[in-house]
Image (cartoon, helix red, strand yellow):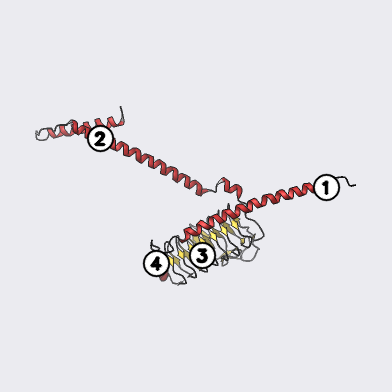
Amino acid sequence: MSATRNRFFAGAALLALTALFATGCGGAAAPTVTQATLDEVELKAQKLETENADLKKRYELLKAETGAQAQAQARPTEEAEANCAPPQGSMVRPNVTTTFNAKISTPKLGHCTFVDPEGSVIGSVRIGDEVYVGPNASIRGDEGQPIVIGSGTNVQDGVTLHALETSEKGKTIAKNLVTVNGKKYAIHVGRNVSLAHQALVHGPASIGDNTFVGMQAFVFKAQVGSRVVIEPGALVLGVKIASGRYVPAGKVVTDQAVADALPRITKDYPFKDLNDGVLHVNHQLAKGYAAVKGEASKPAAEGEAGAAASTAAAAEKPQH
């Protein structure tokens, strides 16, 4: 017996019971269950069954799409892992020991992260996957540390990240640290953040996910939320900026009351989608340059091997 028929008989039984109870109340005549009524119940049951099937299909499709997106975000693709060369070079290097930093740390960089040969990454720095670090950018984890930069972020030409010392002779300087998700950092930059040309982020400082820091903007001793736009030339010092706000170009924000009154980003704000476009460009630059670097290293290695073989063959060849 089909599910539709089951619903049909269930509806008929319900109507019959309704009629029976009605008969027992003051002796009133029971309503007649007509074929038209039964047909109506069956049609409604069929409609519900069709709607349930459609909902189930939509649920399965959404579940599959969500799973695929989560898997793509969780780790880089096998192709990216194969093509991207690990960042290296004299400009990615450990710090030196000092009274304020007794431990030597080497930067840790993620998959398909590209550091331009003219960029500098030093000391206790952890950078996620697919991060672009442009020419003349400086990320110095040799004083305040650690400095952490999330995946998908871009650190453009001339950007500086540096922090006040976070320890002295083994003692932590708590006031020079920020807390993000229960952990302490000199600087914490979230995922998919854009630090535009010549921006300066000086720790202690934190910047939330999907935030844009404009050209020549300055952030110091501040905590900036997610989805914030700091327009070019703005100065943010000693305050907390809530998520979803923007700082107008050239504005100086050094008072918490001023920070709390900053305008919200609405659909009419002209730069609401600015960071999306910047990320679109720099994600491709990070993967593209890292892949080129990976491919360039292969012929060089093969050439060296070939030269070595030729030299060995020449040495074995009899002299006349």
Q: Is residue 305 left or right of residue 193?
A: right
Q: Residue at x 52, y 57 (%)?
A: 281
Q: CA distance from mark 1 to mark 3?
A: 61 Å
Per the image, label 3 sits on a secondary structure element best described as strand
Residue mark closest to the camera, 1 vs 4: 1
User: Are discs 3 and 2 less than 8 Å apart at CB?
Assistant: no
Q: In which image quadrant can residue 168 be found? A: bottom right
Q: Position of residue 107 (x, y in %)?
A: 61, 57
The residue pinned by badge 2 equals 43
Residue mark closest to the camera, 1 vs 3: 1
The residue pinned by badge 1 equals 314
Can the viewer see residue 245?
yes
Q: Amino acid at mark 2?
A: Leu
Instruction: Using a 10 Å C-alpha cutoff, classify the residue at mark 2 as few (fewer than 14 neighbours), some (14 to 19) or many (20 or more).
Output: some
The residue pinned by badge 4 equals 263
Residue mark closest to the camera, 3 vs 4: 4
Q: Which circle marks residue 205 in the picture?
A: 3
Q: Residue at x 64, y 56 (%)?
A: 88
Closer to the N terminus: mark 1 or mark 2? 2
